[in-house]
Structure formats: C-alpha cells, structure tokens
Amino acid sequence: MSKATPFSKILIANRGEIALRVQRSARELGYRTVAVYSSADRDARHALEADQAVCIGEALPAQSYLNIDNIIDAARRAGADAVHPGYGFLAENPALARACADAGLVFIGPSAEAIEAMGHKARAKLLMEQAGVPCVPGYQGQDQSEQRLHREADDIGYPVMIKATAGGGGRGMRLVESTGTFLEALASARSEAQSAFGDPEVILEKAIVEPRHVEIQVVADRHGKALHFGERDCSVQRRHQKVVEEAPSPAVDQALREQMGETAVRAVQAIGYEGAGTLEFLLDGEGRFYFMEMNTRLQVEHPVTEAITGIDLVALQLRVAAGEPLALEQDDIGFRGHAIEVRLCAESPRQGFMPQSGTLVRWRAPRTLRVDSALQDGAEVPPFYDSMVAKLIAWGENRDEARRRLATGLEELVALGVETNQGFLARCLRDPVFAAGEATTAFVEQRQADLLHQDEEHGQQLQALAAALLYLTDRGAGSARSGLSSRLPLIVRYQLRDEDGAATLTRMQADRLQVVIEDVTTEFGLLGCTADGARLECGGVVETVPLERRGDVLHFLHGGEGYSVTDRTYAAAAQGAADGGDGRVRASMNGRLVSVAVREGQRVEAGEAVLTLEAMKMEHVHRAGVGGVVSVISAAEGDQVAAGRVLVEIEADASEESKPE
Amino acid sequence: MAVLETQVSSADATFRENRAGMEALLTRLRSVEQRTRDKSAAAKGRFEKRGQLLPRERVALVLDPGAPFLELATLAGYGMDNPDPEKTIPGGGNIAGIGYVRGVRCMILATDSGIDAGAAQPMGLDKVLRVQELALENKLPYVQLVESAGANLLKYRVEEFILGGSSFRNLARLSAAGLPVVTVTHGSSTAGGAYQTGLSDYIIMVRGRSKAFLAGPPLLKAATGEEATDEELGGAEMHTTLSGLGDYLAEDDRDALRLVRDIMGKLDWNRDIPAAVAEPAPPPRYDGEELLGIMPMDHKRPVDMKEVIARIVDDSDFLEFGANYGPATVCGQARIEGMALGIITNNGPIDPAGATKATHFIQACCQSRTPILYLNNTTGFIVGKDYEQAGIIKHGSKMIQAVTNATVPQITLYCGASFGAGNYGMCGRGFHPRFCFSWPNAKTAVMGGEQAARTMSIVTESAAKRRGQEVDRAALEDLEGRIIDTFEKQMDVFATSGRLLDDGVIDPRDTRGVIAYVLSICREAEQRQTQPMQFSVARP
C-alpha cells in the first residue's frame, strides 16, 4: 500500500462546522468539494458553500448522514473520487471505509481494519499492551459471566469503571465505588449498552480518581513515518463529553510530552496506522498515564493543536490520503504559546444541559477569535444532530492570555434565538480552579454550583432589562415622537426563559424609563436603538445590548449570555370558565337534554361526563370542568334547553377555586 | 431658506426669571394632574381584589407600548367639584386622549372608575362631547373603556340628563360616519349608561364584571316586583350568549384589552394611508428647552414670537409673509416634521394693516390647502381715533370672516395673552379650531383685569361727576379689587382649561411634538376614505 492514490474532488460526508472546515483546506489545496445534506439542512451553509451538494435523505441521521449507500451514491452522482468523513457520524465506522474501497473511492482516514481494531475497546487495549503502551489495569476477557466480572472487579480494586465494549460518548459507562453495588451497576450498564449499541459486552477498568484527560495527536503516512503533534488537555468535561480543550496541557512538561509522544508514535507504527489519529490517555496526579482509547479520525478539538503548531491538520490528512509521504520531521514540529477551545453547544446548562433546537436569529462571532462554525443569521439548529454548533479558539503567548481572550470573546459573542452554554463556558474559563490549571475531569461536577449559578441581583437586573427591552422594541415604540410617549403605568407581563414575571413600566421623561418589579425599582436612560441593539444607561453606565425581536419574542445578550423573553402582555387569557372551569356546565347549543349522568350531591372528577345533549341529530357529551360535588341540577331529562343555559353546577374542591371574587 | 435668528440667551436674567415662572406653573399643573391620578390609584386594593385593572392601567395596556398618546382635557372641571385649588380633582371623571392601538390612531375614552366608582363628574359630559367631536372631525375610531356607576342621584340635574343624550347621538353618528366604535364594558353600564355600550359596533364584555341592564335588581323589584340577579339581568355571559349585546367574552380586563387590540389589528385601517416619509425632518436649530424662558409671566411685557417659531419649526426655517406691512401681526410659512403649515402670531396689537395681511394670508393658505397655526399672544385689536377712522372694525371683521370660513385645519395655541376680539381673530375656541391647546401661562379674557377695573372706575367717576357727587375712593378701590379678582380668576389657564375652553394644557417643550402630532392627524383625516352610511351599524 505505498502507491499514490491521487484524487481531485472530495465528498465530505458530514455537516456543520467540520464540513466547512474540511472544505476550506480542500479548496486551499486545489480540490473541488461536494457536500451532502439531509432534508433538514437544505439551506445550511455547508451545503450552500460547497462546489456541489447532494441530498442524501431525510432529517434523521440514520436516513441520511449515517446512510452509507446514499453517500456512496452521492459520490458517484457528483463524480467525487475521495470521501472525507469528518468526525462523528460514520467517521469511525469501518463499513464506510470499506464501502469507499469497494467503490474505488479514496477514504481520507485509516483502513477499515484499523478503525475496527481501535473501535473495539478490548481489542484496542490488547494491541496497545502488545505495543508497550501503558494501559489501565482491567479486564477485557471473553467470559462475560456475572461471577467472573465481579471477581475481576474485586481483583482490580475499587473504584472500578464498567464500559461497554462497543461504547462511546459516555453511554454504557458506570462507576462502581464498592463491591456491594457492582452487580446492580453491571446490569444497568449492560442494558444501556444493549439498547445503544446492540451489544451488551463490557470491559472493566480501574477507575483513575480525578484524572486529567490528555491526548496525543498523531499523523502517520503510508510510508512508515509517524509524527506526534503534542498533547491536548480535555479534562473539562460534563457527562463524559468534552467542553473545554487546550494545548499544551498545564500538567505536561517537555519530558512527559516527549515520553507520551514517543509512546503514541510507537503505538501507531506498531499497528500500521495511516492518517490522523488521537490516543487518549488518563493522566494521574503523579504523572502516570494510561491508554484509554484511540480515535481514528480528526478530533473536534484539533484547532488548538493547529494554533500552537501552525500546521493545518486537515491538509496533512489530504496529503497522506493521496499517498504523499510526510514532508516533516518530528523536530520541525514546534509549539508556540497556548491555545484554548470551547465548544459552543445549543443546550440549556440550567436544565441539565438539555439540547436545544430552533432558529438562531442573530449570530455575530467575535473578531478576535478563530471561530469554526456553520452559523449565520437565521441558521436553523435542527433537533436531529449533535448540539455542538460552533467552536471558539483563542491563542495567546501564554495560557492566561489565551484564557482571557477566549472568555472576553465568549462574552461578546452574539448568539441569539437558541439557548447555548455560552455563559457557562465563560464561567468555566474564569473559574479560579480552571485559571490555576488545576481542572480535572471532576471539575464541572465539583464547581457546578458556581458555574451554573446566577446571583439574585443579577436576576433582578436581568428581569428589569428584559421588561425594558420588550417595551423599547415594541412596534409602537418605533412611532414615538419625543416627549409624547404615554406616561401611564404599563404593566408588562413576560416569560423570561421559563419563568413568568410582571413589571410596571413608567416613562418618566422622554428618555427615562422606570421599571418596578416586586418593589425593586430600576431606572434606564434610553439613548436610542441601532441596528446593533439598544443603547441603555443604568446606574450611570452606558452599554449597547445586542438584540433581535421576532414578534412577541425578544432575544438579547446580557452579561455574556443569550436570553429569550416572550411578551405575554397581550397573551390570550386562559379560558378557564369557558370550558366549565367555574364549575358550571352549560348547554353548548340549543338542544334536548337526553340524559343526566350524575345526581345532586355526587362527587365528580374534572373531565367526567355529566350529561348528554342532543342537537342537530347529534349527541354532545358535556363534561365537568372541575372536580367537586354536584350542587344543583337545574334541568330534567327531555327538557329542551337554550345555548348557554347552566344545567349543572359543581361546587369545586377548595384548591381548584380559580376565579377570585 | 429663511432661517430665523435669535436674541434669546439662557444666561440672561429675564430669561431665567421667565423660566422660573414657567417651571413653577408646570409644577402646579403636573401636581394637579397627579392628584387626580393618585386619587384614582387609591382604589387599587379594591380593583385588585375584584381581579380588575385600574383605569389608567387599562388605557396603558390598550395603547401600543411607547407610542405617542396625547391626553386631552386633564383639567376639565377644575375647581368645580371643590373650589379649593389644593383639593379639586379635575378630569371630568374620565381619561381621554388620542393614541395608537395596533398602529391605528384612535380616540380613547376611559371612565376613571377609581374615582367615585366612575360616577359623572363636573364637565365630564362636556369632555365626552368634545372628544366625540374630535373623533368625528378627525376620522378617528372610537374606543371606550366603560365602567360607570352612573349619575349620582343626589347631584341630579335635569339638563345633564337631557343633554347627555348628545353623547349617545354622537356614538350613532360616529358609527354612521364609518368610524368603528369599540367598547369594553369593564363594569357597570346601566340605565342610560347601558346605551353607551349598546350604541357600539364592537362590544367586549368581561366575565363576572360587566353589568349592562336598563334596571338593576332593586329598580326592577321596585318597578315590577320581579326578582332577578345581576348576572341574569346583564352579565357578560348572558349578553354574549342570550341577548347578543356582547360580541366578545373576555376572561378579565387584560383579556378584554387584548381583544380591542385584536379587533383594531384586523381592521386594516391604514390601507389607504401612504407610509410616512422616510427622510427625517431637520429639527429646529435652537433648543426647544428654551421655550420655557421666552414668555414673560407679565403679559404686558413684549415678546418676539419669532423666537418661539424658531424653536418649533423644521430647521428654524420661516418664510415671513409681508414682513414690513403691519409688522406687529406676523404671518409666514414653515414646516413641522415635514408638514407644511401657515403660522399667524402677534408681536403687538392687531392693527388694520395686520388684520388685512392676516386675512390675505388665511385665504392664501386655503388656496394651497395649508393648515394654519395660530400662536396667540395678543392683547386685542388696536384702539384709538386714528385706527377707528382707518376702519379697524371692518378690517377686524374681515379677519374674523376669514378665520370662520377657512377650509383648512386650524390649530390654536394660547402662548400668552388672548384678549378681547383678538381671541376671535386669532381663532379662539369659539371659532372651532380643530385643536386648541394652552401653555401654562396662558391668559384668556375679554380684556385685562386692571384694564377692566380702570374702565369701571372711569365710568363710575364720570357718572359721579355728572351728578356732582364726591367720588367714594374707598368704594372705588374695593370695586376695582373685585373686578380684578373676577377677571384674574377666570383668565387663568386652570379656569379656562377647566371649563374646556381648550383641549388641554401642554408643556411648551412639547409644542413641536404636539403640533406635529395633530397636523398628522389632520392630514390623515384628509387622506382617509371612510364609508359613511345612512344608519349606524346595528346589532342583530
């Protein structure tokens, strides 16, 4: 396999920022690009910006980005002769690599065999042990009986980690603190592994307590040369998914770097690996590192390595895939400064990081950072794919500079319309533990309170601001002439994120607005609205608040975080009484009372059938609007009744009394 | 371009004195208005308990947030409920103004039911009739937020009952003129008041709160012996399901106001009105804030009214008409917010040349369909042998004829004195200007108080002299004092505005905004195609 495999047109079997990232390097090297897209991504940037684009199916990944046949067919239609898988989706599925080979397409990545070997955790570990790579003590045997696994766990010593052999992304993983809880954890890990990967097989590993996650980037050509590009530290994770990544690691010195790098190079050479790959290690407090797994693809966090080495890793992937020998020597690879990346995700940190979707109405990336994204004003964030929507990367002469730049850039980032982890990320970067370079994989959990918490004063100011902005951006405000705006107290009701609130707004002067929320008064000076946002003064300080209003919903940036507030001032009132919420069952139309299903004094539940009316040759069942006791039945079976007439009255249970009198 | 120059300096002692006087008057005005608001807001607890919004909260909610709202006649009935200036609660028991509801400029009238449960207050009926007239003349849809306990039977006056019919007549006229009448019955609308609801094109009733019946339970029992509940006789559910008096059933006040907004939003009311000019008009070159320091508190001191014009018109650009002919009467053309207008004002008494020039100017404005703004600052038509012989009466009459029969919108602003027939020549309230506002220092009278007192003294002295009697100096002084007092009390803006002799008192600094607003109302009315009908929209 040392012959050249030239190609000229690359199909990128991916979406989002990574598809654009690959397009960029491909173009620079003179390749034409073909995008694939699902029906949900028809207007997505990766599809629009490629030379050609092919629809490969419906929105669900299984019907599009995971459908190998459709992808190979797309390559054939567009005349592509190479396929770059990006990361995620099919990047580590040997079937794609194999299908490419079968179709005569160059797969930009390692061989199917290498992917397969590294994809199987137990096999990978065995191979690595054979190559002299230190591994976490554990058990990866064929005997999957409960007794054997339990005995092995006892031998390894607790805490022990149970991992699904075919696993990834934290699924099928369980941490077991003691022998007593082992069997229970095993059962749940297996059932999760079965449902997620269709394979209940697990391995056991000694759990390294509060380790750092340090990984080594390697690239190997098909001529036997392999190079490492230093390490990345990805210790800041939540639920086993990386959030902040940096290079170099604050915990790795030059000697350790060389030691880990040489180990990694030795490993990939031992298995005849080709292309870019990453070996992930756990690093304990004493500088011992253990092989965890190898990723046989480009990593999400590759930009931090690019930032400190000045090397385009995607370009290297393309060269290696074309059969070119690596033109670099290990000594050519130098490291300068420090780089940190954060993953901006459409998710709600305050709701357990629940993924969010919707329309990103406004997107302004800070100019001071490298931002890899496929976003733009009006970009859709579909619910079908990974929640990561952008990566922000800062470089600095030293770690503090990079950190400061990134945190400030994050706070300036305007990403409105879909909730993101923007504020959470900035707080991570500014956290004293992270600032000191001491974050381990336990960081997010340990610092959660501070990372998620907003103080009360912030909350009050935020609400006042939200109410003021709703007022200022109302369509009516646009027609305001100086001095003539109504000075009457306006009660604005709103829903800020998920919480309902009410504020009384009074225009004090032409350019001053008073906002009162539950006896807390905030005053704003109104300096005007521009295309960028509203310019407001509060407490003597003037700031421009970036915002975007769509109908009743206003999106704005405050304190480095995007918020959405909905104007509920004119929301239709709940038709409580209309459907019998006042305890009265009324004739819905003129008709004949056919039957009464209750008697006076009887208890009924809300929604229970009370009577039936016949009108227009149809029977209409009337139900109780509230639960309670039937107090009055004012009509008898057979009566002709008029629409709106109260037929049954129910004395509602005290707690359900909704209408104050 | 004819940009006005200015002599006004805010550092000047006279300026500062004038400003201090004007600020004191503004403070008094705002505190009187605030007293009414506070009185109404004191009912908050009662309203909240019933799940209701206060009247001003209702008005604020029906209006487009932040949009202009020109409140009218806030001083109506000043001193009539209670002669003590520290205790009177003016406003006529209702809140009225022109504002936007879903982009539709409307006349809003809300019962101020925080006060006396919305019972009629002095000048309340006159205020209603005036705002109805404004709505008709300016083709404004009419929004009523009704909640009235009706008339206080202890204060029954037959003429108010009889003339009150005019307000119902006007509702029928508005509807027939093609102007939608939208009503929320927030609470009671009973007996005669029931027609305030009944004569509306769109009626929104509030569940559990609306009450509209000719006779409530007590009166019904007294009249026929029948017993029935409020709900049965006039509740929202009854009216929206059985009688058909109500068109929309709202869950609460807020919901009702939302419905008003929804109704207005669905009218497509502005379909024929061209979108506003995109290019912003150049503001005046001089600070409008300085309008506070131009008018002297003593109306006998002369003022150059061009200093006022320089602070309200676009780019301070004023093309004076016949500047050297009858120069005490100033006429000229300008624009405000891009809208052309003719301005007539006074730098001295109106003399024959001034009267004839003004007549000519009014007719020229009518020829070019240019609205006219009268900035009143006049002690009247000039008197004296020479002027009488020059025919001041006939020239003044000509001017009054022109004002009366002008075919363009005329807007009157009392900036200072408006005395004698000068008030007529300068389109005083009697001449039905489309809008009429006052500054807080305005004085309106047949003549100055001292002048009147002096006149009486001379008449009395000469009568005594004819009879050969000695003049009683003390009695004469007492007489003079009483006359001055009578005149001063009635020429004051609180008295005149309280009697609805204008549409409201404005802060001089808001002048440009207010004039622009009413000019655009006039312009819109001219452009608007309405669908007049022989009869009003009738309920089924």
Image (cartoon, rainbow, N blue to C red):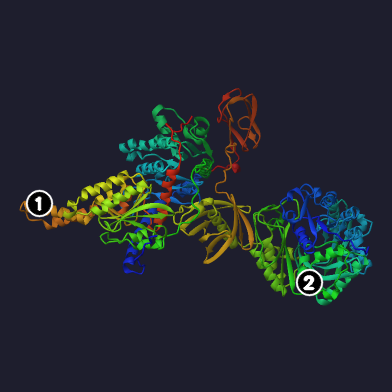
Please give left or right for residue A368 compared with residue B276 in the image: right
**Residue B407, horizontal then vertical, whole percent:** 35, 44
- Residue of label 1: B463
The furthest residue to the left: B468
The chain identifier of the residue carrying mark 2 reads A
* Above or below, comparing residue A638 to residue A100 in the picture: above
Vertically, is B11 above or below B171? below
Look at the numbered disc 1 and give the secondary structure of its residue.
Answer: helix
Could you say where residue B11 lies in the image, as x and y percent from the top left?
A: 36, 69
Determine the residue positioned at 82% across, 76% down.
A254
Name the side, left or right, on which B7 lies relative to A544: left
**Crowding at mark 2 (Cα within 10 Å: few <14, some 14-19, many 20+):** many
User: Is any atom of residue B336 visible in this view?
Assistant: yes
Q: From the viewer's side, name the closer residue of B99 and B240.
A: B99
Q: Is residue B384 visible?
A: no
Picture quadrant where residue A415 is located: bottom right
Dot 1: chain letter: B
**Viewer-nearest residue: B476 or A28:** A28
Front residue of this view, candidates A632 and B350: B350
Pointer 2 residue? A309
> The residue under label 1 is which amino acid type?
Ala
Percent x, y for residue B251?
A: 54, 41
Asked if badges 2 and 1 are on one and the same chain, I answer no
